[in-house]
């Protein structure tokens, strides 16, 4: 049985992140969720910064890589349900006069003179961003970004070219936090975590060799099935109680949409501990913080800050 962590390697049209790649950002204008021109410029800047970072890393690694960026807008009278990938892709293809997203990919490659193309659909409404990747049974390659969080576009783009999440299931998480705590595939929502770990470099085609650290991660994923992955994803993104390992500590408690949400406990590596209410990933509500130097703050916290 093939290792589940290699399930997207060399699949679909985005087989390796090298050569000349077209990246098309499509801003979806839904009723009640309309991007302003200023917001579009902000998102474009963030995407450009992510691509420049990849170019820098590619140069250091001796990998030939170029990007050609384009921007489009899709005006729709429908508010699309979260996760309706096939329905939305068909509608977008139709708006471009094509029968499928794969035809849009081919047309973009032809127009840009590129070898590979990636579509990034940006929705202004809130949600968990994700990449829809090609596999042996389903063809769909696009990134779906929600809200104004823009750094994760780097994380999601890497998915299209073979990279996998390293924050679940638990067997993989424990090795990832030990070996690559700053990996963008382990904690892509944190702007301080943008390293390309050894396994990711192998999966996206930047090296043919698997380092001892990459092999350790593959070993952790050996024997896992698609059901294990789906179960792990459900537990991470929405769980009444779970354990999440971060580069600077460990969280115990409920998770909602990959954010700490509800009554939980955060233990930092320096010895600090917060126990109390979390909202949107921050201490918010009533709780107690014990700092690394022994100070205690008990009371109300607002957006991660003690208010008394």
Image (cartoon, helix red, strand yellow):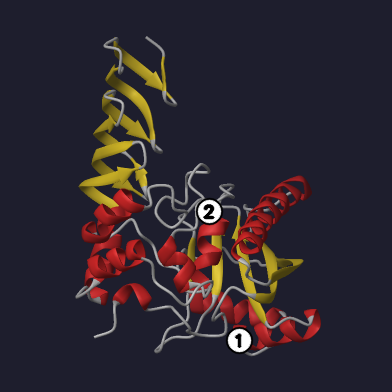
Residue 72 on image: x %, y %: 75, 67
Give 70 or 87, whichever is nearer the viewer: 70
Return the x and y of residue 281 as percentages of the image width and height.
Answer: 39, 37
Q: Name which quarter of the figure residue 67 lies in.
A: bottom right
Q: Which mark is residue 152?
A: 2
First along the sequence among labels 2 and 1:
1
The quadrant in which the C terminus is found is: top left
Of 140 and 224, nearer the camera is: 224
For the point 23% across and 76% down, which residue is it?
Answer: 225
Q: Is residue 255 above or below residue 157?
A: above
Q: Give the secondary structure at mark 1.
A: helix
Tell whether 112 sits left or right of 202: right
- State the image coordinates of residue 218 (x, y, percent, origin top left): 29, 69
Above or below residue 174? Residue 222 is below
The CA distance from mark 2 to mark 1 is: 24 Å
Which image quarter holds the N terminus?
Answer: bottom left
- Residue 11 position, x and y percent, is 47, 84
Q: Can residue 97 be seen in this snapshot?
A: no
Eye-nearest disc, 2 or 1: 2
Q: Is residue 27 visible?
A: yes
Residue sitting at x 44%, y 79%? 9
**Mark 2 secondary-structure assignment:** loop
- Quick one: label 1, few (<14), some, or many (20+) residues within 10 Å? some
| Above or below, comparing residue 109 to residue 304 in the picture | below
Q: Height in image: 238 above or below 120?
A: above
Q: Residue at x 51, y 62 (%)?
A: 156
Q: For this rendering, which residue is in front, 180 or 267?
A: 180
Which residue occupies 44% across, 53% down? 183
Label 2 crowd (10 A; few <14 / some 14-19 / many >=20): many
Identify the disc placed on residue 102. Answer: 1
């Amino acid at each position: 049985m093939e290792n589940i962590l290699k399930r997207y390697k060399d699949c679909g049209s985005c087989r390796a992140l090298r050569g000349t790649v077209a990246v098309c950002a499509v801003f979806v204008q839904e009723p009640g969720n309309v991007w302003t021109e200023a917001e579009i410029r902000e998102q474009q800047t963030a995407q450009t910064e992510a691509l420049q970072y990849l170019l820098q890393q590619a140069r250091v690694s001796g990998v030939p890589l170029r990007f050609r960026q384009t921007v489009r807008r899709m005006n729709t009278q429908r508010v699309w349900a979260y996760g309706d990938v096939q329905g939305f892709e068909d509608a977008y293809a139709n708006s471009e006069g094509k029968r499928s997203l794969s035809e849009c990919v081919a047309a973009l490659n032809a127009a840009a003179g590129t070898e590979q193309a990636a579509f990034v659909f940006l929705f202004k409404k809130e949600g968990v961003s994700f990449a829809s990747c090609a596999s042996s049974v389903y063809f769909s390659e696009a990134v779906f970004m929600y809200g104004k969080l823009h750094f994760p576009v780097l994380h999601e783009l890497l998915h299209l070219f073979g990279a996998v999440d390293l924050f679940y299931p638990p067997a993989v998480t424990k090795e990832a936090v030990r070996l690559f705590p700053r990996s963008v595939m382990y904690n892509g929502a944190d702007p301080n975590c943008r390293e390309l770990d050894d396994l990711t470099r192998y999966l996206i085609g930047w090296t043919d060799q698997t380092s001892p650290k990459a092999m350790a991660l593959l070993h952790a994923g050996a024997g896992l099935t698609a059901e294990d992955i789906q179960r792990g994803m459900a537990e991470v993104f929405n769980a009444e109680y779970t354990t999440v390992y971060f580069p600077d500590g460990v969280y115990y408690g409920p998770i909602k949409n990959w954010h700490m949400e509800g009554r939980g406990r955060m233990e930092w590596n320096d010895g600090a501990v917060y126990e109390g209410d979390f909202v949107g990933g921050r201490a918010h509500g009533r709780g107690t913080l014990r700092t690394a130097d022994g100070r205690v703050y008990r009371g109300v916290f607002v957006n991660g800050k003690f208010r008394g």
